[in-house]
Image (cartoon, coloured by chain):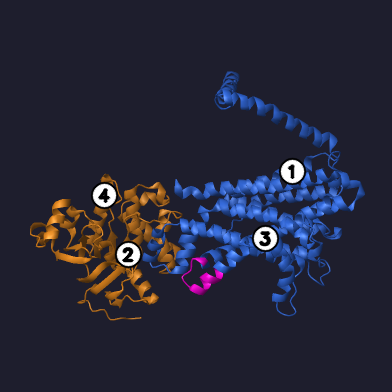
Amino acid sequence: MSIEIDTDHPIILFEDVHKWFGDFHVLKGINIEIDKGEVVVVFGPSGSGKSTFIRTINRLEEHQNGKITIDGIELTTDLKNIEAVRREVGMVFQSFNLFPHLTVRDNISLAPMKVRKWSRQEATSISEELLERVGISDQADKYPAQLSGGQQQRVAIARSLAMQPKIMLFDEPTSALDPEMIKEVLDVMKELASSGITMVVVTHEMGFAREVADRLVMFDEGNIVEAGSPEEIFDNPENDRTKLFLSQIL
Amino acid sequence: MAIQQARSISNISNAAYNWARKNLFGSPLNILISLLIFPLLVYLFISSIDWILNEAEWDAVTSNIRLFLIGQYPQSEVWRIGVVSSITTMLLGISWHLKGLVFRRLSLIILLPLITLILIPPIFLDISIVLRSWLVVVSSGILVGYNVSRFWSISSKNLLISWLLSMLIDFILLRGIEGVEILPYVSTNEWGGLLLTFFLAIIGILLSFPLGIFLALGRRSKLPFLKGACVVFIESIRAVPLVTLLFMALIIVPLLLPEGWRLDRVGRAIAAITVFSGAYMAENVRGGLASVPIGQTEAAKALGLGPLLTTTLIVLPQALRNVIPAIVGQFISLFKDTSLVVIVGLLDLVGIGKAVVLGNVEYINQQAEVYLFIAAVYWVFTFSMSHVSQILEQSLGVGDR
């Protein structure tokens, strides 16, 4: 299968995307283009649709109207397309969601072996390499519950990276962590951002956003109300709700 | 050394004293209850021991021990049961060495009664020298297996295959092959006693467990027809007593089979037991499936695992682990429920007991002894099962610490 991918095209493309939960209109016509290698931080009040937005990118949530295209593949009900997209898109969750019945090493090597059909040897060597990269190579034989929250989240990042995704999604990756563990996770994410991978991060860590993000996107009531570079958003926000929100969290 | 010993003994007696003071004589009411119950327990214990050793007559049990163990299975073919048991204990020994904890406990549980039987002097237990030597062979199977696997290790997957394969071989050995001289065909109608109880229980468990998993997954499926069929199946089976199912199986199973196929009475009983137990198993498994957080499925999906892999590698292992007590409880129920096959004319352990008591005038006044013996046998196995389930739970709980 060889699909010509035009590198000029955005790797994530949302065109007038709508989503309802029952009667609740959670995404009200989202339009956004994200380029390859771009780091986008999404923020906004709770219930604004930012989490739903990020979860539609790998179709953990289905959208009902509009068009989502990921790396040239349109997300429809076609299961093949969905699985193809999920192979290219890694995701890190607020609650880690590591597999508690598998060791750290098996958590990381499972998907490469079962989905990419790598040999155990290849999968083990990549998991070793990734554990080194996230700085916990001495924990490979432990079970997730034996690790601290920060370590678990770093394993979760390594687990996603093992599939060698083109895009990484982070859904409030530090919100469930004790304050002293936030930095170790953000450091891994910063290193990742500098490696050139495309990242979409839902977070309220504004220090991280200012340092790493290429673009900030503010969600409110199911709409993108403002988007721009960190300088534009922090120093000179145009929208009143962005101003209000930033004044509350900064 | 002696001082140390004395000290540790006084420590123990101190601890016992403190325990008793706290738990037995902690409050006036507590003292009253202890004083009332303790003599009662002592009285019950002494009088039951006295009854068992002095008053009870056990020859209904001891002279029919072969019937209780294997029913009408032909005497000339008894060696096959010895071989089957030895294969099983050998595999157990291998599993003990390779997998440890659970199988070690299982091995010990099986060795304990075997060795007890071997060591009871002939004056107290009149069993033939042949049976005694078979007991020795069967119990040494565990040691043989254990030592074999020290030199020749096999993978977990092959161990599982060996177990399943051994069961097939066991079945062929026990049943024999028509036309083969050294393995003459023994109809399952001649199987009886503990052999039949085990056979029904093991096959029932092996079939109803996967059936239960399938039904539970089906019930959670998004496909309306599959879901509907599973719901109807589970709910209608659970609405019917096992006795009814056994009678129905006797009549209905032959009608369902294609022309020319026949299933003997044991096979029909297994069909009823499997279907019955499978429906209950499904509800247990469903509880386990519901206990796995949705985040697990999402994480698996996000990694690109399809529905089949997500279920088999991520959701099911956690779901089953969460409901081990309920699953083993269902196995124990099934084991005891096999005694209901009496009503379709099969002679399992209980059936043999009934036949022994009612069939011989001299044993008619030994009913209590016979049923007590049977109860004790059931107790040993059900207690072992629940004990092993606890060990299993602990050893699988390693990720929860």
Q: Residue A182 — which label?
A: 4
In the rendered image, residues at marks 2 and 1 fall on the same chain = no
Question: Bounds of the magenta span?
Answer: B219-230
Q: Earlier in the sequence, mark 3 or mark 1?
A: 1
In space, the residues marked 3 and 4 are separated at their CA atoms by 58 Å
Question: Looking at the image, which residue is at 55% across and 63% down?
Answer: B213
Quadrant in the picture for the N terminus of chain B: top right
Are the residues flagged by discs 3 and 2 from a single subunit?
no
Q: Is residue A160 above or below residue B66?
A: below
Q: Residues within 10 Å of mark 2 (few under 14, many from 20)?
A: many
Residue drawn at 52 percent across, 68 percent down:
B218
Please tell me whether mark 3 or mark 1 is closer to you in this view: 3
Report the predominant secondary structure element of the magenta stretch.
Answer: helix
Instruction: Judge the density around disc 3: few (<14), some (14-19), many (≥20) Cα neighbours within 10 Å.
Output: few
Residue B115 disc label: 1
In whole angstroms, how far apart are the C-alphas of marks 4 and 2?
20 Å
Q: Chain of mark 2?
A: A
Q: Colour of chain B?
A: blue
